[in-house]
Image: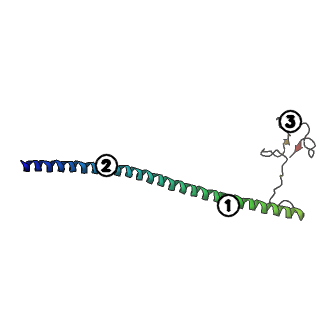
Amino acid sequence: KECREAVHSLQSEMSDKDTSYCDVVRNERAQRKVLEADLEETRLAMDEAVRSASDREREAARLRDKVTRQENYIARLQESAKQNRRATALGGGRVGHRARTSLAPAGKHVVPGTKVAHYGADGEENDRPNQYVAEEEEI
């Protein structure tokens, strides 16, 4: 009888320890799942931050390039204006300027031998043409 009680006691103790260890393993697995989920969330956030930083760097490089091109363009314009001022001061004409050879409105095609009519902004014929035109001119 004593042996049976000892065996029963040992089996009960072993069952309790087994249950206890299984609980510990279950808890550790649950903690591991939580930590792995946190790790994955952190990894995704880090990837997004790296991607965002890369996008910002790319945008900053694009904007720096744009500013450099604009500065170069402005420098060319300033140099051109400087050359025009020099040429004008020396008695020359405007550098790179083509004089208009026709008195026809810009963009209008005029057939030689026809008269050029002068129209105002309202589309009506202007009864007071520009000063340098007597009335209608023949081209």
- The crowd level at tag 1 (other Cα within 10 Å; few <14, some 14-19, many 20+) is few
Q: Indicate which label's residue lies in the foreground, 2 or 1.
A: 2
Q: Farthest residue toward the left?
A: 1
Q: Indicate which label's residue lies in the foreground, 3 or 2.
A: 2
Q: Nearer the viewer, residue 126 or 94?
A: 94
Circle 2/circle 1 CB separation < 8 Å: no
Q: Is residue 94 above or below residue 105?
A: below
The residue at which mark 3 appears reads as: 125
- The crowd level at tag 3 (other Cα within 10 Å; few <14, some 14-19, many 20+) is few
Of callouts 3 and 1, the N-terminal one: 1
Q: Nearer the viewer, residue 120 or 71?
A: 71
Q: What residue do we see at 93% from left, 44% from top?
A: 131
Image disc number at residue 33: none
Q: What residue do we see at 76% from left, 59% from top?
A: 77
Q: Position of residue 11 (x, y in %)?
A: 14, 49
Q: Position of residue 82 (x, y in %)?
A: 82, 63
Q: Secondary structure at mark 2?
A: helix
Q: Amino acid at mark 3?
A: Glu
Image side of residue 63 versus residue 117, left or right: left
Q: Amino acid at mark 1?
A: Thr
- The crowd level at tag 2 (other Cα within 10 Å; few <14, some 14-19, many 20+) is few
The residue at which mark 2 appears reads as: 27
Q: Position of residue 23 (x, y in %)?
A: 27, 48
Q: What residue do we see at 70% from left, 58% from top?
A: 70
Q: How is the image coloured?
A: rainbow
Q: How far is mark 2 from mark 1, CA to CA?
A: 61 Å
Of callouts 2 and 1, the N-terminal one: 2
Of callouts 3 and 2, the N-terminal one: 2
Q: Amino acid at mark 2?
A: Asn
The residue at which mark 1 appears reads as: 68
Q: Position of residue 32 (x, y in %)?
A: 34, 52
